[in-house]
């Protein structure tokens, strides 16, 4: 994938990125290749879809039926990755393996932005003449930055303010981001953040197949002529030996640091991270360390007779008797949710007992410790899955929580 890395930050024809992806994947000698494409539902993304099909999918994916190969597709407002999707896609492309064989799963995440070049002095991003009328593109990202209200906008905004960093603030500040580039940079940040969600989903997934994952955040530049594309970076997760560590090469997610240069009517976007390889973070551990570093990881004292009954059974080892650990956990969770839900939600997430789709929410809990309603939602979802826990797992989680919730 070295030749793909060389494209990071550079505007190129749509087929150039897909062809390099094709050649790079084939050279690695995988037994099979699967693919997922995430785009905005906007009809302007048709060229992006077609380029992925013609330059990559039709050459390397297994046939779905006679003379027909297809990627797993997500198309929604704003090009949002949907939690759990990569696991379904992987299951679709998985087939029995011989010793030493592996798969490649490519996840290409495209946001998009239109370019208006009618002003020769300064091209502007974010609007174009669609069907003869001026129109925003991407309309979903524009609506988010304009503080509109809709479920899809909530999802986009949650990613943009994840980990306590408000990436919309510099986009709204003309002193940090040139308004002409506001929507280009918004699309680049969005692609990075949605790709990160896919990576977190992959890292949290225990695949039964040796798989090398390649995740590409990209931005389609919608033009009056042929569309172009900027590859923002490349994530790789090498699960061929069971590893789940992510490595990233490319642009960062701070729009205030992006710089644009032009040569031969093509852009190059750079920042202070584009030439460096860096490892992805373990967000479950990160949430716990954030909580501890903020001085909030202290024992929570609860004087509640209902919890005392649970604590006595744990003290006397009764929770190690067959199903009893799950029974005690079911009894204790509503008490935690009622009196001090945030520590329980953080601890259960850090232990991998709570789904990775709560990552942005739990990051917020670890920093602010105030959103009891959100913490209760996390605990309620876990409560519904207690019966599926292995007894030993239930025992360990119960002991951990009892240490946190003291007399």
Image (cartoon, rainbow, N blue to C red):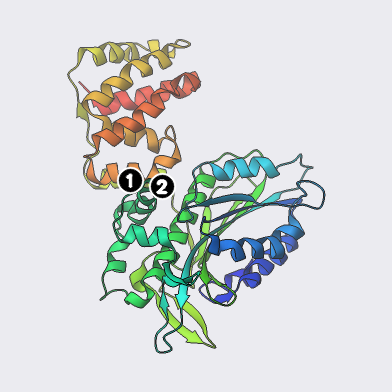
Tell me which corner region of the image, top left, top right, bottom left or bottom right, holds residue 236. Answer: bottom right
Which label number is shown at residue 363?
1
Above or below for 153 versus 223: above
Callout 2: few (<14), some (14-19), or many (20+) C-alpha neighbours within 10 Å? many
Disc 2 to disc 1: CB gap under 8 Å:
yes
Q: Where does the image place residue 237, in percent across and percent down from the top left?
A: 57, 53
Badge 1 marks a residue whose secondary structure is helix
Give the camera-side residue of 28 and 269.
269
First of labels 2, 1 by sequence position: 2
Taking the image as shown, residue 93 lies to the left or right of residue 170, namely right
Alpha carbon separation for disc pair 2 and 1: 9 Å
> Furthest-front residue in view?
132
Tell me which corner region of the image, top left, top right, bottom left or bottom right, holds residue 378. Answer: top left
Give the camera-side residue of 279 and 364.
364
Tell me which corner region of the image, top left, top right, bottom left or bottom right, holds residue 169. Answer: bottom left
Residue beneath label 2, please? 283
Above or below for 156 versus 90: below
On-image quarter of the N terminus: bottom right
Give the camera-side residue of 155 and 4.
155
Badge 2 marks a residue whose secondary structure is helix
Depth-wise, is mark 2 or mark 1 nearer the camera? 1
Q: Where does the image place residue 104, in percent across and percent down from the top left?
A: 67, 52
On-image quarter of the C terminus: top left
Callout 1: few (<14), some (14-19), or many (20+) C-alpha neighbours within 10 Å? many
Q: Where does the image place residue 374, in percent across and percent down from the top left?
A: 30, 36
Determine if residue 197 is in view.
Answer: yes
Which residue occupies 41% across, 86% down?
119
């Amino acid at each position: 994938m070295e030749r793909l890395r060389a494209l990071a930050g550079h505007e190129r024809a749509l087929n150039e990125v897909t062809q390099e992806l094709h050649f790079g994947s084939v050279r690695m000698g995988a037994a099979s290749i699967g693919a997922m494409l995430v785009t905005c539902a906007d009809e302007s993304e048709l060229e992006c879809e077609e380029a992925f099909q013609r330059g990559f999918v039709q050459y390397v994916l297994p046939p779905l039926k006679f003379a027909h190969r297809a990627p797993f597709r997500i198309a929604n407002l704003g090009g949002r990755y949907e939690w759990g999707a990569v696991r379904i896609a992987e299951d679709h492309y998985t087939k029995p393996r011989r010793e030493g064989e592996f798969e490649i799963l490519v996840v290409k995440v495209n946001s998009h932005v239109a370019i208006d070049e009618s002003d020769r002095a300064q091209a502007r991003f974010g609007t174009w003449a669609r069907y003869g009328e001026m129109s925003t593109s991407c309309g979903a990202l524009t609506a988010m930055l304009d503080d509109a209200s809709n479920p899809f906008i909530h999802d986009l905004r949650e990613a943009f303010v994840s980990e306590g960093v408000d990436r919309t603030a510099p986009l709204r500040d003309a002193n940090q981001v040139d308004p002409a580039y506001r929507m280009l940079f918004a699309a680049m940040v969005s692609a990075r953040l949605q790709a990160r969600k896919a990576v977190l989903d992959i890292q949290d997934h225990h695949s039964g197949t040796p798989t090398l994952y390649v995740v590409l955040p990209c931005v389609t530049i919608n033009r009056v002529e042929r569309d172009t594309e900027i590859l923002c970076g490349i994530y790789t997760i090498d699960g061929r030996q069971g590893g789940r560590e992510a490595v990233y090469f490319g642009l960062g997610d701070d729009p205030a640091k992006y710089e644009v240069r032009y040569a031969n009517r093509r852009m190059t976007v750079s920042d202070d991270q584009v030439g460096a390889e860096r490892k992805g973070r373990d967000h479950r551990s990160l949430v716990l360390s954030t909580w501890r570093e903020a001085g909030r990881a202290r024992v929570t004292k609860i004087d509640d007779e209902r919890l005392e009954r649970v604590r006595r059974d744990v003290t006397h080892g009764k929770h190690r008797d067959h199903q009893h650990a799950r029974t005690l956990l079911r009894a204790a969770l509503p008490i935690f949710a009622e009196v001090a839900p945030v520590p329980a939600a953080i601890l259960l997430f850090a232990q991998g007992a709570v789904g990775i789709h709560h990552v942005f929410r739990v990051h917020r809990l670890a920093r602010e410790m105030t959103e009891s309603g959100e913490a209760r939602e996390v605990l309620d979802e876990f409560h519904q899955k207690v019966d599926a826990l292995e007894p030993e797992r239930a025992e360990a989680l119960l002991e951990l929580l009892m240490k946190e919730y003291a007399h």
